[in-house]
Structure formats: structure tokens, C-alpha cells
Image (cartoon, helix red, strand yellow):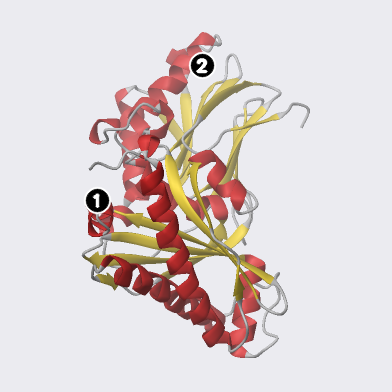
Amino acid sequence: MQMDEENMDDMEFDILTEIGNIGAGNATTALAKLIDGRVDMHVPKVEMLAFKDLAEILGGAEELVAGILLSLEGDIEGSMLFVLENRAAHHLVHKLMGSDGSTLEDGFTEMEQSALVEIGNIISGAYLTAISQLTNLNIIQTVPSLAIDMAGAILSVPAIEFGKLGDKALLIESQFEDDEIDVCGYFILIPTLESYTRILKSLGM
Amino acid sequence: MDGTMIKVGMADANICHSPDAITTLGLGSCVGVALYDKTTKIAGLVHVMLPDSTKVRQNQNKAKFADTGIDMLIDMMRKEGANCSLLTAKIAGGAQMFAFGSNNDMLRVGQRNVEAVKAKLKELGIRILAEETGENYGRTVEFYPETGDFLIKSVGREQKTI
């Protein structure tokens, strides 16, 4: 089977949605443990979006966001991007570090940036573990890298990878909620063409 | 500014006449190529994502690639009455948004986009008057055909006109 997102059938889309669901569920549990609080997850939205609409989801191309990128090795190759809105990123960092810390205007201190990388690492790790168990494929994640910048600029990285395949990207939007605020997180899984085929095959497609 | 601001999306191209201006938001590893004919004050802007259309099977969207995107933009400008032998260029973008060691091909795409844009412009004999490329931050760009100014805005940096 070739990945051809224009002609992706309902069954394949359902499978990717389910993968997103399970991954996000596991990630939510990890997040709750990390900040030692209650976190609820809304049903994730899986969307195939045209590039021009991708940044709009995050509040526009110039919206400040935190992106954490990991590259994947093993049976599934590619990369994974976890994006947090600026406000949500500050909230999680403060919860984790138990401090008032920096304000939205100040950006993040170096310590807070490390904490963000760790949050991304743990949440993405939980997400990937779920996919790994589901597919019985081995996924190795590399050390993550953090960027805090305009949504358009951060999303250009996965968009370019999807751009080799078509004109749309697969976005899994997971909304978490703790007792204080709604935390919106977005996962973008970018498997290589071969890995994508392998995922579907492992599930009997 | 008297005119309106025309928006160009990712993997998209458009043109404008003075006093209008043209913009693309949040360039990361993509490159914004602004072409300009100062005699007619017509400008064009393309938001290029990938270096080479011949390396990709799904290449119908011409604006996505450095090679076909620039050709397409010149066609659009010619149809609007620009004198295409007098075009000059200003370019921005091509950042490496994330820093890390492995999986280098994916991360170097910004640099490869810039190289591909330069090669294409050279082939067409279009001079690059100014550039703001590389580094590790996103850029919003605005081109003003009235003056030929290319305004660059980034998070936490002074805005810059080239």
C-alpha cells in the first residue's frame, strides 16, 4: 500500500484516529503523574489539514507556541512534534516546578526550558509507547529539541515532511484539562512513507 | 500604509501593485521569495517549502517548490504587466527551527531551500538585492512595492528592513 492521503480510505483514517486516541490517553496519564494532579482528556480530534489551515488551528501563524521535536528510530522512522500553546506551556512548567516563575511576557528561563523539554519527552514517550504496544513495533525516540517561536515557523518543520507526500498534514489535537485551565496540546506524528506502511501492516491492513 | 495587505499562505504565491503590500506569516524552514519590478511597482511573493519539484511525486502544487514556484510567480507577474527582464529579488527564511544531531536531512531543509532559491534566481539572471536567511528563528515578512522595502519581524527581535 502506498500512502496517498488524497485517497486515504475511511478504514485507514479510523485506524490513525484510534492510534491517536490510545497515544493521547497514555500521554494524559503520564501528564497527570508528572504534575501530580488530576488531568482529564477530551476525545482527541484527528484532522487531515491543508498546510494553509494548519497554523490557524493554533490561533494563527504568528501565535507564540512551544514545540518539542523528537526523531524516531527503530521499526518506525520519522519524527514527532508535540506543540503546546504558550499559556499552556507556562502553566505546566509552573505546576511542575511549583513556582510562580516567569510571566508570559518574559518567555522561559533556561531552567524552565529544560523542564519543558522533559515534559515533551515524557508525554511524547507515553504516546509512542502506546503506539508501540498496539502495533508491536519497536520505536526508539531520540533526545528532544525545543523551539519557542511562531506557530507557522514551528509547523513548517512537519509540514515540509508531509509536503513530500502531498498537500496536507495529519494533526492529532488533544485537549487536556486540569483543575485550573484547559491545556491544549497537539501531536503531529510524521512517519516516513515506509514506516507508515509498516504501521498499517502491523495492524492487519 | 494606504493599500491593503495581501496574504500569502504556506506553499502559496500571489502578486500585488503599489500601494498594496504583500505578506507571508511565520516562515520557518520555508523561504519567502519576493520579486519586484520597480518600473511598474509590481511585486510577487512565493512561500516555498521544498527545494526541488523533480524529487517529489506529488508535485502538482507549483508554489510549493523553489524551482517551479519562482517560474510560476514570474508568469503571474508578467500577466499583470511587470517587466520581467528587470526583476530583482529579496529573500528571507530557511531557518533551522530545531537543533539536533541526527536525522540531519530533515533538519537541513531550510538551508537546502535557500540554496535552491539562489540557484534558480541565478539561472534566471535575477539579482538578489538582500537576504535574511538561516539562523534558528521564525520570520514574518512584508514587501512594500511602493518603496521596495522588505520588512522582517521575529519574536523577541527588533524588526528589520532590508
Instruction: Output the chain of dot 2.
Output: B
Residue pictured at 30% horizontal, 31% vertical: B53
State the separation of the CA atoms marked 1 and 2: 42 Å
Quarter-wise, where is residue A189 in the image?
Answer: bottom left
Which residue is under mark 2?
B77
Tag 2 secondary structure: helix
* Image side of residue A154 versus residue A57, left or right: left
Q: Residues within 10 Å of mark 1 (few under 14, many from 20)?
A: some
Task: Give B162 or A201, whichever is nearer the viewer.
Answer: A201
The answer to whether marks 1 and 2 sit on the same chain is no
Quarter-wise, where is residue B96 in the image?
Answer: bottom left
Instruction: Output the chain of dot 1.
Output: A
Which residue is under mark 1?
A197
Q: Position of residue B122 (x, y in %)?
A: 32, 28
Kindly report which numbered mark, 1 or 2, lies closer to the viewer in this rendering.
1
Amino acid marked by disc 2: Met
Seen in the picture, residue B135 relative to A86 is either above or below; the reply is above
Q: Position of residue B74 (x, y in %)?
A: 45, 19
Residue B97 visible to an observer of this rendering: no
Amino acid marked by disc 1: Thr
Give me the disc on residue B124: none
Task: Give A135 or B70, whichever is nearer the viewer.
Answer: A135
User: How many badges with numbers are in the image?
Assistant: 2
